[in-house]
Amino acid sequence: MNIIVEITLQFGMLSLVAFGGAGAVLPELHRLAVETHHWMNDATFAHLVAISQATPGPNAIIATLIGWHVAGLSGALAATTAMCGPSSLLIYFFMRFWEKIHGTRWRLIIQTGISPLAIGLVLASGCIITRGADASWGGYGLTAATVLIVLNSRWNPLWLIGAGAMLGLAGVI
Amino acid sequence: MTQRREITHSELFWGFNQIALSGFGGVMAWARRAIVEEREWLSSEEFTTLFGLCQFMPGPNIVNLSVCIGARFQGASGAVVSLLGLLLAPFVIIIALGALYGRFGELPAIQAMLRGIAAVAAGLILAMGVRMAADLLKRPFLMIFSVAILVAVVFLHWPLVMVMFGLAPFSMWVAARRYCSAP
């Protein structure tokens, strides 16, 4: 199958199940890109995620980078459009309905039921990125330290990213 | 409802452009500041309601928010303009970085830096999950679904679409039975 068509179909499907945002579909992106299609290896995937985290803007931009890596500019355009298009159309039409069922029990049930799945997916993303990124005790230590710092301070993540780059360069990881 | 002033297409575009460029790793906090406090497009309450919807619906939250706000002020064309404002600059930046990675990614120094950044990136995502999970302490029975979906995707490598639609009805059922009592 043409790779652009493939990217569009796969990312378009993902767009509609990305409950909890783009961070939640990282495991599925990893499965598609590394295991199913062999577009890249584990380490490259982790690098692309790292680059996307160091870029300002929505997390969804990881799709752009994967598309670019796999098929250049047209891949990047296809991946971005497919990642953002279907969910955007859905919310555009769903907006009015959602405002209409404001305060109903149904809305509460849907919200309460979806949230544990979204949370599980974000944690799963963290696990998969850790597995791909960390090959040494230094790496695991840095990941753990990041979690602790983020949970206990209000530092801008950019400083942590910069510190990570320096520690990597110093050969600690 | 309060009197709503006209928000033009160009205001939407540049507003979301600024939001996109000011946020690393957590655009949402910036979005609230820009939309509610600086530009006064929405009241705090309106923002929270809209944000709830954007979080709950599939798709990147901030992307959803740009569509909702654009549509609210300027209809379909407003939604498109807001979305473009949000995505255009990050798109260009990440392609530039991707090109640099393609050219220099093999250099040992770059590999070492990326290893460090990746370890931090993993931590940022895990911390976000832990923060979100704190909400579940009030509804402990639902944690089983977080664990189930984590095991399914991390260890069993099952396709997400299948897992999601398989688990959602059960988790909504438990939510309805235990945590959303009938009126």
Image: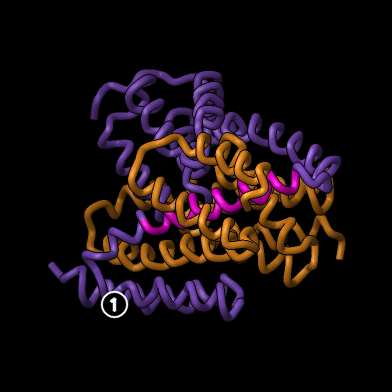
Chain colours: A orange, B purple
Q: Residues within 10 Å of mark 1 (few under 14, many from 20)?
A: some
Label 1, on which residue? B174
Residue B105 is left or right of residue B89, and the answer is right
**Mark 1: amino acid:** Val
Q: Is B101 drawn above or below residue B181 in the view shown?
A: above
Residue A37 painted magenta? no
Q: Is B179 drawn above or below residue B35 in the view shown?
A: below
Q: Position of residue A59 (x, y in %)?
A: 56, 46
For the point 49% across and 37% down, the residue is B66
Q: Is B104 drawn above or below residue B176 in the view shown?
A: above
Q: Position of residue A27 (x, y in %)?
A: 59, 65
Which segment did they paint magenta?
Answer: B110-130
Q: Position of residue A60 (x, y in %)?
A: 59, 47
- Quadrant of the drawing holding the N terminus of chain A: bottom right
Which is more toward the observer, B30 or B112?
B112
Which is more toward the observer, A162 or B1?
A162
Q: Count up the numbered dots.
A: 1
Q: Is A166 drawn above or below residue B33 in the view shown?
A: below
Regarding residue B2, the answer to whether it shows in the image is yes
Regarding residue A80, the answer to whether it shows in the image is no
Residue B64 is left or right of residue A33, and the answer is left
For the point 47% across and 49% down, the residue is A146
